[in-house]
Image (tube, rainbow, N blue to C red):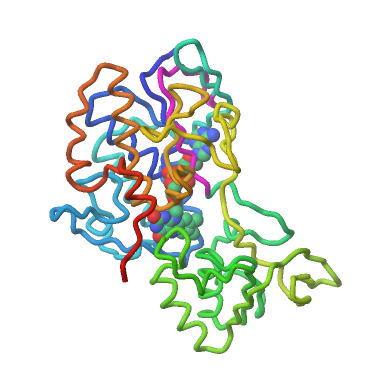
């Protein structure tokens, strides 16, 4: 049975980011990826762009918001401020190549069995044992679909959707992205959301709509082809080739399948039972995002949540990745000093009181 110090599952920004930190420490690891590096990003709708801007400000202690290591910058690699999904996958691929990260692609982890010391993984390419396991499988490939319709995550290009009139269920980032793209193509769109995220202003970017999207929303509203409705869609009924959406203020007919922008996530597959859960979220140690139920198992990526705050943006969860690497290094007796650049450049999110409660003064 082959054994590695650390198995990282998933080659998105979280998995690649942990790999980069471990590489710096000289800790042995392997990244196991079901598809290809950056697979989730390759599946974004063609028109979708990053809402968090990229800018090469690294040298002044402000790493590019979308970078996963202190010395790299998607803005520099891609020459773009708002990369597309495939662009960002190219950035991740460039990191893997430049730093020679060991990634096994086309390797799906199907089963995880905790051992007295470490884990036994059953993968599509055979078994593997690891002393530590970092779960970084993201959320995009696990759509939340409570109603019949076409989930945002299934759309490859808005331009290829047939129809002139659309109803979007969900009015946060993905719902507004769908609406803005469809309106830009000349379509008429209604967006339903009972919480009216487009009107929120709390100062927390995981709750408020981004400035990038708000600017696009103003342009879309100016066309007169976009309507934002503060109501919850409860039920969808297929009727004679069209769809009736019953919502809390009445009903609306749509000639096209409802676009479901109802979010992603909700499961951790083979490791779900290895975490304790509270209100739908895995309980993690505040020190290093380790399972409180299974020592040696760490979570990396947008599923991390502390003190009610979601670490769902790359610039948020990347600050936790060196903490995972550092905790593993400590247990292996390896000096974590080489991780200092993460701390020096603001990519070390161990002050949860500041991360989770600070808001803008004005
Ligand atoms: C439309 C959209 C726009 C977004 N815009 C932004 C933005 O502007 N800025 C920002 O910061 N964030 C943005 N996000 C969020 C961001 O994309 C995610 O937080 C990020 O992709 C999470 O990274 P990850 O590495 O955890 O997961 P992923 O990027 O999803 O990577 C997970 C990887 O795990 C692999 N995998 C899954 N299961 C297995 C398995 N069992 N075995 C092996 N491999 C497996 C997958 O194939 C995948 O490659 C956006 C998300 C969406 C959907």
Q: Is residue 30 above or below residue 245?
A: above
Q: Is residue 295 above or below residue 205?
A: above
Residue shown at the point (53%, 65%) measured from the top left: 172
Residue 9 in view of the camera: no
Q: What residue range appears in magenta?
A: 123-139
Location of the C terminus (image quadrant): bottom left
Q: Position of residue 225 (x, y in %)?
A: 58, 85
| Residue 219 placement, left or right of 287 | right
Residue shown at the point (36%, 19%) measured from the top left: 5
| Residue 78 placement, left or right of 171 | left
| Residue 161 placement, left or right of 107 | right
Residue shown at the point (52%, 84%) measured from the top left: 221
Quadrant position of residue 239: bottom right
Residue 343 in view of the camera: yes
Which of these two is toward me, 276 or 267? 276
User: Farthest residue toward the right?
Assistant: 240
| Residue 346 placement, left or right of 3 | left
On whether residue 136 falls in the magenta region, the answer is: yes
Q: Position of residue 344 (x, y in %)?
A: 17, 44
Residue shown at the point (62%, 74%) measured from the top left: 191
Q: Position of residue 65 (x, y in %)?
A: 30, 56
On whether residue 109 falls in the magenta region, the answer is: no
Magenta segment, prevailing SS (helix, strand or loop) = strand
User: Farthest residue toward the left?
Assistant: 59
Quadrant position of residue 60: bottom left
Which of these two is toward me, 63 or 96? 63
Q: Is residue 149 above or below residue 131?
A: below
């Amino acid at each position: 049975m082959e054994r590695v110090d650390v198995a990282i599952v998933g080659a998105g920004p979280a998995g690649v980011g942990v790999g980069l930190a471990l590489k710096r420490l000289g800790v042995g690891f392997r990244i196991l990826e079901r598809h290809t590096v950056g697979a989730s990003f390759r599946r974004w709708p063609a028109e979708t762009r990053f809402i968090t801007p990229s800018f090469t400000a690294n040298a002044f202690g402000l790493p590019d918001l979308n970078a996963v290591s202190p010395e790299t910058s998607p803005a520099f690699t891609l020459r773009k401020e708002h990369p597309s999904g495939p662009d960002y996958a190219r950035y991740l691929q460039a990191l893997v190549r430049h730093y020679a990260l060991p990634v096994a692609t086309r390797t799906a982890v199907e089963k995880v069995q905790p051992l007295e010391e470490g884990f036994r993984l059953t993968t599509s390419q055979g078994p593997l044992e690891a002393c530590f396991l970092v779960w970084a499988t993201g959320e995009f490939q696990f759509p939340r679909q409570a109603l019949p319709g076409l989930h945002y995550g299934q759309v490859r290009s808005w331009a290829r959707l047939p129809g002139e009139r659309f109803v979007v269920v969900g009015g946060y980032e993905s719902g507004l992205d769908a609406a803005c793209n469809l309106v830009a193509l000349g379509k008429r769109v209604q967006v339903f959301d009972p919480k009216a995220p487009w009107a929120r202003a709390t100062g927390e970017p995981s709750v408020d709509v981004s400035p990038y999207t708000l600017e696009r929303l103003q342009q879309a509203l100016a066309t007169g082809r976009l309507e934002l409705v503060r109501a919850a869609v409860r039920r969808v009924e297929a009727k004679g080739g069209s769809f009736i959406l019953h919502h809390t203020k009445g009903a609306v007919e749509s000639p096209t399948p409802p676009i479901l922008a109802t979010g992603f996530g909700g499961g951790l597959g083979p490791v779900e039972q290895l975490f304790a859960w509270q209100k739908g979220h895995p309980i993690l140690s505040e020190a290093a995002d380790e399972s409180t139920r299974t020592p040696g198992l760490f979570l990396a990526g947008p599923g991390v949540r502390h003190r009610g705050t979601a670490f769902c943006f790359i610039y948020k969860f990347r600050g936790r990745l060196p903490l995972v690497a550092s905790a593993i290094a400590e247990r292996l007796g390896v000096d974590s000093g080489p991780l200092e650049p993460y701390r020096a450049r603001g990519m070390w999110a161990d002050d949860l009181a500041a991360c989770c409660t600070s808001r803008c003064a004005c």
